[in-house]
Amino acid sequence: MPIKTLLAAVLALSVVPVAPAVARPDPLRQDAEQITAVGVTGVLARTTSQYGRSRTVTDGVAELGRRRPPRADGYFRIGSTNKTLVATVVLQLVGENRMRLDDTVEKWLPGYVRGNGNDGRLITVRQLLQHTAGIYDGNFPSIDTAEQYYQRRFAIHTEEEIVRAGLSHAPDFAPGTGWKYSNTGYDLVGLVIKAVTGRRWYDEVERRIVRPLGLRHTYWPGTSPGIKQPHAKGYTRFAAGERYVDTTQLIDVDASGGYISTLADLDTFQRALFDGRLLGRAELREMTRTVPVDETATQLWPGARYGLGLFSRDLACGGTVWIPGGDQLGYRTRLAVTGDGERSAVVSMSSQLYDSLDVVFAQDNAARRLIDRAICS
């Protein structure tokens, strides 16, 4: 057979029609895309299986007007996840027999909580951690409009100042007779930590949690308004029809929220909380003894209850998941970990959308679907 004919025959045999590969759907990426579809500018998501395998995806952009995606190792404000850090410090002190959960505030801060119906002799540390102390939170410094953001973003508010403002008002209810989320109550916990240890709450968090767990990308920014690089810019839409406001810069120093972290560090923290690296069994039992919460929380998170520094809620596939999440201007963080510390998820959204209650719920529901699908599967 002539060479040319032979080559043609070989080539003809080698060209076998092959069906095009069909890409398998990626549920984690699809769920992240559903969050940005609500209007969130950037999403970071991390899940860890019971075998310790972690996976991270991102979606959206790191900055509006640019196509650069957010980085999976980016820093963000953790908001009220800070409360879980504070509660962990208190429970470690309890485990060391340096204080008790049922100690009164009066024991550690004599005469500090008095007046306008407030009485530290009737309020326990447990009630502060569980939002059942009745401490008024309506004077807590807030930012509700773009104008207020530009006026107040660099204001410094200490625990002492915030507690004094809260105590200038009558309590919402008698201690132990109700439940209402109180940032001011956690600032009072911060003062108790200082009275017990002689150090500020953030120094104790650093000494007891950050360094032992090797959380190299978790830090308290103090009075610096910026965030370390890399980070996605945080945006807030304060009302329907308004533009996104870049609210990345903010001074947040009090004990109700303030730390900055990353997906990987927060995942390490929440898993360590439940696998025995941070708390003994007795202290973890106290943390996970829950009480009923208000209607708003149960609407947002079906089956929600509150322990010490963290919520629990129902999983879509049944059972309970623990959620030490938090919000801060420009950033919404949702965490979830199973009670054995084996399965977990972290979602960071670099937008806060306040168009309406429906939009608030839509953003949170999209994050909850991602978390539930990741943990349930």
Image (cartoon, grey):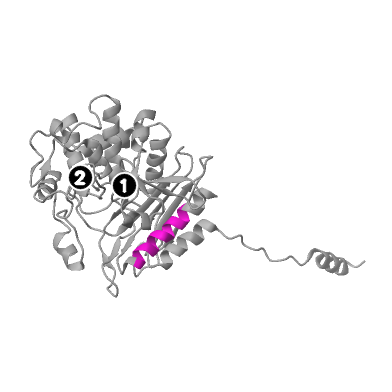
Q: Residue at x 21, y 63 (%)?
A: 144
Q: Looking at the image, tell me whether mark 2 or mark 1 is earlier in sequence order.
A: 1
Rendered position, 211 above or below 23: above
Three-letter amino acid code at disc 1? Answer: Thr
Please give left or right for residue 107 compared with residue 286 in the image.
left
- Mark 2, other Cα within 10 Å: few <14 / some 14–19 / many ≥20: many
Q: Residue 343, how many percent across, how many down?
A: 48, 43
Foreground residue among 1 and 356: 356
* Residue numbers of the magenta segment: 358-371
Three-letter amino acid code at disc 2? Answer: Gly
Residue farthest to the top? 97
In the rendered image, which residue does mark 1 sit on? 81
Determine the secondary structure under disc 2. helix
Q: Confirm whether the magenta stretch covers residue 344.
A: no
Q: Confirm whether the magenta stretch covers residue 360.
A: yes
Q: Residue 89, how many percent across, how many down?
A: 27, 35
Q: Quadrant of residue 88?
A: top left
Frontmost of labels 2 and 1 is 2
Label annotation for residue 185: 2
Q: Residue 25, how many percent across, how many down?
A: 58, 60
